[in-house]
Image (spheres, rainbow, N blue to C red):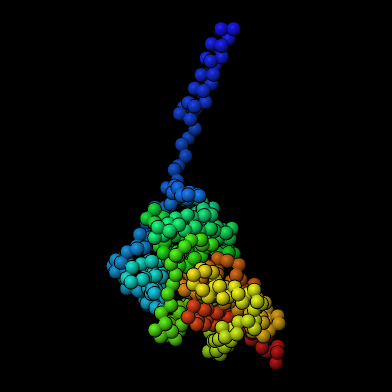
Amino acid sequence: MKYRGVLFWIMLILALIIVYAQPVFSTGKPTTAVPTTAVHTTKNSYETLKSQGMATFVGKDVNQFMETYGQPTDIVETGFGYELYLYHPATKNGYIEVSVAKKTIQGIKLLGKQQADMAPFSLGMEMNDVTKLVTISPNFDFTYHEKKVTLELGEEDMNYRPLIALDDGNFVMLFLDQTTGKLYSLMYLSKELLLKLAPYTLTGKELPTFTVNESIDWQSINTAKQAMVVYLFSLLNYEQNIPAYQTSPNFDQKATQWLTEFLLHPDDYLTTQRTLALKRAQDPDTHERFLLTEDEWLTLAKVSNDKTLQVFFETPVYDPTFTLLTWKSSAYFTLYDRPVTRAMSVVFSKENMVVLIQEMETKSEESDAK
């Protein structure tokens, strides 16, 4: 019995040595380390990527950016406490848009086939390529001015608009095309701008919001934003080999009339529940947004089932390009699948944006009608 007890303990010690020593003596090939860092928070942990290239300019003086990339093609005042420095496509870079508040860069958007300084990302990559670089997290818990903040991404967000943290405290938001699943744009942004834009479900107290400047010339600002969005639509169509949209003063007038009518009498076109949703979105502290449904804009346009006309409306729109990129990476902005020429109108009224798209009759259809 004594020897059996000794034998038992010897066998137990040998088994423990074999189990715990196995990883040390493993002959398997080492795996390549992912260039990320784990950030541990209260509820979850998320990885961060090294900030590099154009991302390093977020939080810096805009003059430093201009020393590297030159003077902007145009500067657009938003009316919400910051300006947009626009760089139209050149030989080296595609479209660049820099969000600047008090001379400090808060965000940078990249769009177009040719883009420099956006490593480790590249336009055209798919989600499978992105996940090889970093794990896509559904939740982000962090602090802003010593207050706890939580961001929650939905399934569509993670697939087409994932958020990735950078090791300098900033973020990068990717935009993948809803149809092709390929990366077509990205945005580097500060923590403050991320919370103001609120592209995901947001929880927290005393969150930052955009402030409307009531003392500036809003007619000029609205016109400048309209021209900017029309240009961006043309650029996106060009990148995808889609015919450019046609513009028309009469079409612009129709869009203006509809937007004015809707803003004056929203309850004529919305249910009680949807009217309340619109009012919540008009309160900046809620960080909610409101989009017209197809049935609602058909009622607004006073057409029962016009398959040649589409109306897209959102409020609040604080950053037109950001909204356009979000639309394109979601199911909301889906055009009828027909290879036809289309007319387009973009109209702003402060933080309200409407886009009308109308299929145009071809010459053959016009001749047949005669």
Give the image location of residue 77, x and y in percent: 39, 78
Quick one: quadrant of the C terminus?
A: bottom right
Identify the residue at image location x=41%, y=55%. 166
Query: Residue placed at 48% from the left, 80% from the top?
Result: 350
Q: Is residue 51 depicted above or below 208 in this figure? A: above
Q: Looking at the image, which residue is at 49% across and 32% down? A: 28
Task: Classify 5 as above or below 86.
Answer: above
User: Is 293 in front, or is 174?
Assistant: 293
Residue visible at 52% across and 79% down in the picture: 352
Which residue is nearer to you in this view: 205 or 258? 205
Q: Is residue 81 left or right of residue 204?
A: left
Asked if one can make out residue 163 in the rendered structure from this viewpoint, the answer is no
Q: Position of residue 167 (x, y in %)?
A: 39, 53
Q: Nearer the viewer, residue 211 or 18?
A: 211
Q: Position of residue 170 (x, y in %)?
A: 40, 59
Report the quarter where the N terminus lies: top right
Q: Position of residue 86 (x, y in %)?
A: 39, 73
